[in-house]
Image (tube, coloured by chain):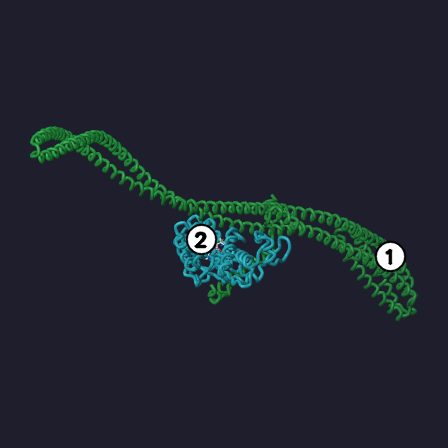
Amino acid sequence: MTPIKKRSFERIRDIVYETSGIALTSRKEALVSARVGKRMRALGIDDFEEYLRYLEDHHDEEIVGLLDAVSTNVTSFFREPHHFDFIADEMNAWYESGQRRFRLWSAACSTGEEPLSLAMVVKEALPQPDVDLRILATDICTETLAHCELARYEDRKVAPIPADLRSRWFTSTGRGDERVWTAKPALTDLIVYRRMNLSEPPFPMRGPLDAVFCRNVMIYFDDAVRVRLLAEIGRLLKPGGLLFVGHAESLAGMISGFKYVRPSVYRKA
Amino acid sequence: MLRSWSLAAKLAVGFGILALIVVIVGGAAFIDMGRMQSLAEEQSGDTDVADNVMEAKFEVLAQRLLLMEVIQTSDADEIERLGAEIEESFTRFGELMSDSIEYLKVDAERDETAKKALTLVEDALAQHEEFEPMISRAVALARANTGDKRAAVAAELAAIDAEADARGVKITADMQEIENNTDAMVEVAAQESRATAERGRMQSIILLVAGVFASILLAWFITRSVTRPINRVIEGLTAGAEQVSSASSQVASASQQLAEGASEQAASLEETSSSLEEMSGMTRQNADNSRQADAMAREAQAAAGKGAASVAEMGAAINAIKESSDATAKIIKTIDEIAFQTNLLALNAAVEAARAGDAGKGFAVVAEEVRALAQRSAEAAKTTAALIEQSQERADRGVAVSADVHAALDQIASSVDKVTQLVGEIAAASEEQAQGIDQVNTAVAQMDRVTQANAANAEESASASEELSAQARELTDMVSVLIATVRGERAAVAQTRAVATTTSGARVSSQVHRMTDAVRARAKVTDPEKVIPLDDEDLADF
Ligand SMILES: C[S@@+](CC[C@H](N)C(=O)[O-])C[C@H]1O[C@@H](n2cnc3c(N)ncnc32)[C@H](O)[C@@H]1O
């Protein structure tokens, strides 16, 4: 494969930013070269210029492939665990005060670990039959969404799930390292998956939502996109609703409408 | 040298050499077989010659017998018949001999015995050439002199017969020798063919053994020259896979640490920036307050100045009061003297009234009144004098106090001056502090950006490391395929285990592989609506 030219890189960077809000700095040239290169191998193209021509000719189909390739999908079950403790307590309090309908949103769900963790935690906290719980899980990446639909995970991926929860909410097949775990319908039936681009609000939901998990995705955006996204989340959250962001993400300077609760947790004013 | 050859060249040369060996072994056998065949042919040819010669010998014998019969009979018909038989025998003899000559001529070129046989046969033929006319003459003579005429030629016939007999004996003897000779030739050929067969067998065995040995050597050599480098490649690949997988777990742990570091940093940054915000609010307030204090201190200074002036004025006023009290005291003295004089006058009037008696009675009352007034006046003057004295004392004190106040006010003024200066300094410092905090704030914001970029980097390297370890697994798989090809299935299994154990947690999970492959395959033809069969009804719930 021929190495990527600066112009091609800049063109790809612009397209990615325009279509997804993912802001690639000039230092991401190696990353783009590696990830888009993989996509090109799958298509049998070995020149970035040629790929850009292909992208132009097949924009609507290939833009999905490009974004699938460029997005970083790292995630894990119970990532940043105290968020889950916090939401469980909060849900309990809401239930005590008479609320029965709960709508949660995992805004960049990647391969599904986040919405499944959320579903497990909430079902454990509120086992009552009168609880009406639904979780919306969205991502821009179709590949990971396909993974979400399968809800199947390698043995090492489920390691962070406490053993009792795992045996309650998952079934496993195979032995040893070949063991594969599948989420039970009781869990997956709570979750609605959908492809959604966070950089293009407004979103087709009406709200009010009780909590939004928008974690480790704003690190890929620039401030303009972040501010737009936060305003839309503010619109969708109920007063007193919670916003969880990634631990490295601070909303300092753009949290109008939110109150700081603790690091990476905000409450809509 | 062999090392630099390509695999194809090695195989081509190897199998070429094998083919050559096969050609040599087969060719040698082929040549031997040809020789054996020609020997067999020769043997059978020699036997034919021997048979021919023997038959020819019998013909000569027959010819002699027929001649005898010709001589003994005088019947013309009988003679005719015998003559014909003799002619036939001659033809047969000629044919047999010429066949043999023809055969022997070919052989004679390379075979001494054949050559000898040929001369003998030719010799015999030559003798027969002489023998034949004798018999023909006898037959002609007998034919011409049948019946009674026979007696006339009997003697001549007997002579021919005797000569022919002698010749015939010689010829048969010679031919017997030829027979013996050809028999020897047959024997020689048989021996030769046996020897050739033996030699051929030996040769074949030697060549076969050599060929097999050479093939084995070649096979071993080629195998070694092929498997050795492949084994080296396998070792390299195995080590590479191990290294890749350990490097990827290193990258993974590094990125994990990075991520943790980033989130810790982010948390403290968040705290820092919120306390900074508070601090910057406080400094701004400080600056404001100090500005206000500054203004107030300036006002106080002005007020103190004014106070000092007022105190001076007051001192002057008090002095004036004192002077007027002094004046008043003098006046009171005068009043006191006037009262004393009045008292004296009243006494005098009373005395005069008493002297006047009743007529003076009224006057006496008035004088008494006047005296009382004069006494009260003197008293009031006395009290006033005391008061004035007091006033004078107080005024004196007042002057002293106002001097004190003046001094105090002067001190206040200079203190306020100092305060103003200090407050001004404080205000400037707060201003600077506020600016500094603003700078820190921008720095924190920048750090925040860096932290977020770090978090993104950490995730990216985590995903890269995941990819790397997948690659390492694939590499291991390929290595085991190679091992299976080169060393056999069992070795491959063992090797894969060995690699797998060194790459903790990176063991091949074929099922998962298949699964992710399926995901990939699905993703390749992605149409988001197909992947997520969802209508807006589902969303309406949110
Ligand atoms: C690093 S993962 C975070 C997953 C999960 N929220 C967590 O914290 O573990 C980031 C995800 O954001 C998604 N993403 C990136 N840009 C997006 C966009 N513009 N709209 C929606 N999702 C996006 C990527 O596809 C990826 O799956």
Real-space Cα separation, disc 2 to disc 1, in angstroms: 142 Å
Chain B: its colour in the image is green
Along the viewing direction, whichever of A262 and B232 lies nearer the viewer:
A262
Q: Horizontal placement of A243 versus B364: left or right?
A: right
Query: Label 2 crowding class (10 Å Cα cut-off): few <14, some 14-19, many 20+?
Result: many
Give x and y (percent) for residue B533. 51, 65
Q: Residue furthest front?
A: B358
- Residue shown at 25%/39% (left/top)? B299
Tag 1 subunit: B
The residue that mark 1 highlights is: B172
Asked whether residue B241 appears in the rendered view, the answer is yes
The residue that mark 2 highlights is: A266
Along the viewing direction, whichever of A169 and A155 lies nearer the viewer:
A169
Along the viewing direction, whichever of B24 and B524 lies nearer the viewer:
B524
- Residue shown at 60%/43% (left/top)? B1
For label 1, the SS is helix
Amino acid type for the residue under numbered disc 1: Thr
Query: Label 1 crowding class (10 Å Cα cut-off): few <14, some 14-19, many 20+?
Result: many
Q: Which chain is cyan?
A: A
Tag 2 subunit: A
**Is the CB atom of the residue marked by disc 2 within 8 angstroms of ligand 1's nearest atom?**
no
Asked whether residue A19 appears in the rendered view, the answer is no
Q: Horizontal placement of B38 versus A200: left or right?
A: right
Along the viewing direction, whichever of B537 and B216 lies nearer the viewer:
B537
Give x and y (percent) for residue A243. 45, 55
